Image (cartoon, rainbow, N blue to C red):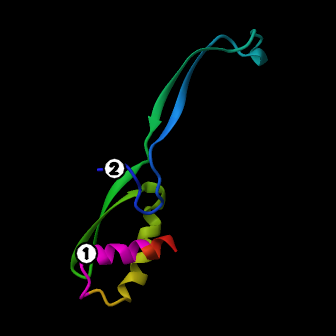
Amino acid sequence: MSRICEVSGKRPVVANRIVRRGKAKREGGVGKKTTGISKHRQHPNLRKLKLEVAGKTITLRVAMSHVDRVYEALPRLRGMKLERMSEAEIKRALLRLVRS
């Protein structure tokens, strides 16, 4: 399962972890020196949301920064005719509403 937010598209990014030593110039030292740089991954803060819509359970992987957008879109989704739609179609309709 990929670590990608279904709403915003947030995904893991590669960043540098920098290790320094020494005393900063503003504190009276000769300056900070870099002693090591290593790459590491920063993952989005994803949570699984289980939503009950039209008697069907929909699961979304959403970044915490976008959870409120999903809950704001739910009332607009309930106005649509969802009884005949499958879970995948309801999920697609919800994501369309959230992204717009």
- Report the amino acid beneath label 2: Ser
Taking depth in this image into account, of 70 and 15 the one nearest to the observer is 15
Identified at 39% across, 58% down, the residue is: 62
> In the image, residue 81 lies at what x, y percent?
32, 90
Residue 2, numbered label: 2
Residue 14 position, x and y percent, is 50, 36
Secondary structure mostly seen in magenta is helix
Query: Magenta stretch?
Result: 83-95
Query: In which quadrant of the rendered view does residue 33 lie?
Result: top right
Determine which of the numbered discs, if any, sits on residue 87 in the image. Answer: 1
Q: Does the magenta stretch include residue 89?
A: yes
Q: Where is residue 90 in the image (x, y as percent from the top left)?
A: 31, 77
Q: Nearer the viewer, residue 23 or 88?
A: 88
> In terms of sequence position, does the residue under pointer 2 or pointer 1 come before the other?
2
Q: In which quarter of the image is residue 53?
A: bottom left
Local crowd size for mark 1, using a 10 Å CA cut-off: few (<14), some (14–19), many (≥20)? some
**Which residue is rendered at x = 41% and y = 71% of the image?**
95
Which structural element holds mark 2? loop
* Residue positioned 29% across, 86% down in the render: 82
- Looking at the image, which residue is at 40% across and 61% down? 6
Q: In this view, does 32 lie above or below 72?
A: above
